[in-house]
Image: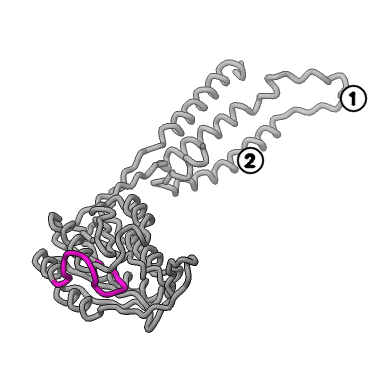
C-alpha cells in the first residue's frame, strides 16, 4: 500500500533532497565523537563483567537515531510531496454517424476473412474506438431494414450490438433504399451540424419499400453526407449455400451497383469506395475517419494535494521523543 502511495507522489522542490548528503557526515561525526569519549581499562579477564550490560546502555544511540529521523522527515517535508489529480474537460462539436451495414446472404462470401460481414464488423468496431466523442448508431438491412442501435455515446453498448449482427436476422435481399432511409430517419432529429452515413453493401438494390433515389433525395434535404462502400472482389466469390444435402460452397458472380452508390455519394457530398479485400476495407474506414474530424477541445486541469504534513508531524514526534529521553532516561547530571 505504501509503495502504491509513493508511485502517485510528485515533489515540488526535489532539490531539497540534496540535504540528505549531510546525514552521512553527521553519522561519521557522531561515531568519531562517541569513540573518542570512551574510556579504556586493561584487565586480565572480562568474565566478571558478563551480564552487567543494561537496557539503558543498549539504547544509548536512540536519541541520535531520533535526531537523524527528525532531519530526514524535515527534508522530505521541505521537498513538498504532492499528489496530482488531472481533470479533463472536453468541449466541442462531435459528429453524428450512422453505420448502415448490408447483412444479406451474399455477405457470407468468403473473399474476405473470414467473410464479408465479419470483416465489415471488425473494421466498424475499430472505427468506433477511434471516435470516442461522437454519437454513433447502427442500422442493418437486407430485404428490409432495422435499427440495431440508435445514436449513442455509449460505445460499449453499440459494439455489443454490432457483435450480435449476423446474416439471417432479416428477410433476405438487398434493400439499399430502405437501409439508407432508416439511417437518415435516425439522423432527422439530430441537433449536430455534421451528420454522416456510412453505407456498406455488396449487391444491387432488389427489395424494400423505398427507392434508393428517393432515399438519396431525403438525405440531401436533411444535409446528410453519405459515404458508400461496395465490398467484393472482382469476378466471382465462394458463398456458402444451404441445400438439402447441407451447406455447400458455390461460386457466385459479384454484382455491385457502383453507378448507384457513386451517385448517392456524390450528390450528398460524400464519396464512393470499392473494397476488394480486407486491407482495402480497413484503409477506406481510415480515410473516412480522417475526412470526418470532430472539432473537440480537451482542457486538462492539474490539481495538487499537499502531502508534506505527515512527514512534518513525524519529524516533530521524533524531536519531542528525543527531548523527553534526554530530559529523563538519558539525562546527564553535572
SS type, badge 2: helix
- The 10 Å Cα crowd at callout 2, few under 14, some 14 to 19, many 20 or more, is few
Residue at image position (58%, 15%) is 328
- Tell me the magenta residue range: 198-213
Q: Which mark is residue 45?
A: 1
The one nearer the camera, 170 or 96, is: 170
**N-terminal label among 2 and 1:** 2
The one nearer the camera, 31 or 77, is: 77
Residue at image position (40%, 81%) is 236
Residue 109 left/right relative to 189: right
Residue 51 falls in image quadrant: top right
Instruction: Identify the residue at the far left of this view.
Output: 221
Question: At which x and y percent is residue 64?
Answer: 59, 30
Residue 22 falls in image quadrant: top right
Instruction: Identify the residue at the far bottom of this view.
Output: 235
**Residue 334, can we see it?**
no
Tell me the chief SS of the magenta region.
loop
Q: Which mark is residue 28?
A: 2
Residue at image position (51%, 37%) is 2
Amino acid at each position: 500500500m505504501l509503495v502504491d502511495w509513493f508511485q502517485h507522489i510528485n515533489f515540488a522542490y526535489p532539490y531539497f533532497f540534496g540535504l540528505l548528503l549531510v546525514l552521512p557526515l553527521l553519522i561519521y561525526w557522531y561515531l568519531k565523537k562517541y569513540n573518542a569519549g570512551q574510556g579504556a581499562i586493561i584487565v586480565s579477564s572480562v568474565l566478571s563483567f558478563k551480564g552487567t550490560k543494561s537496557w539503558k546502555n543498549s539504547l544509548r544511540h536512540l536519541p541520535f537515531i531520533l535526531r537523524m529521523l527528525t532531519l530526514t522527515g524535515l527534508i522530505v517535508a521541505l521537498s513538498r510531496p504532492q499528489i496530482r489529480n488531472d481533470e479533463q474537460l472536453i468541449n466541442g462539436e462531435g459528429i453524428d454517424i450512422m453505420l448502415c451495414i448490408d447483412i444479406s446472404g451474399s455477405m457470407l462470401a468468403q473473399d474476405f476473412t473470414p467473410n464479408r460481414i465479419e470483416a465489415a464488423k471488425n473494421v466498424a468496431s475499430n472505427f468506433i474506438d477511434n471516435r470516442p466523442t461522437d454519437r454513433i448508431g447502427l442500422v442493418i438491412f437486407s430485404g428490409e431494414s432495422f435499427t440495431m442501435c440508435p445514436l449513442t455515446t455509449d460505445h460499449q453498448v453499440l459494439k455489443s450490438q454490432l457483435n450480435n449482427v449476423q446474416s439471417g436476422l432479416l428477410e433476405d435481399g438487398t434493400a439499399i433504399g430502405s437501409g439508407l432511409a432508416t439511417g437518415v430517419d435516425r439522423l432527422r432529429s439530430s441537433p449536430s451540424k455534421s451528420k454522416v452515413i456510412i453505407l456498406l453493401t455488396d449487391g444491387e438494390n432488389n427489395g424494400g419499400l423505398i427507392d434508393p433515389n428517393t432515399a438519396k433525395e431525403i438525405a440531401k434535404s436533411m444535409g446528410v453526407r453519405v459515404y458508400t462502400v461496395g465490398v467484393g472482389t472482382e469476378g466471382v466469390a465462394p458463398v456458402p449455400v444451404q441445400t438439402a444435402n447441407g451447406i455447400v460452397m458455390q461460386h457466385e458472380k459479384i454484382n455491385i451497383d457502383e453507378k448507384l452508390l457513386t451517385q448517392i455519394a456524390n450528390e450528398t457530398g460524400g464519396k464512393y469506395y470499392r473494397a476488394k479485400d480486407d486491407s482495402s476495407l480497413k484503409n477506406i474506414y481510415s480515410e473516412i475517419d480522417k475526412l470526418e474530424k470532430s472539432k473537440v477541445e480537451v482542457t486538462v486541469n492539474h490539481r495538487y494535494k499537499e502531502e508534506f504534513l505527515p512527514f512534518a508531524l513525524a519529524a516533530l514526534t521524533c524531536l519531542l521523543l528525543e527531548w523527553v529521553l534526554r530530559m529523563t532516561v538519558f539525562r546527564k547530571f553535572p
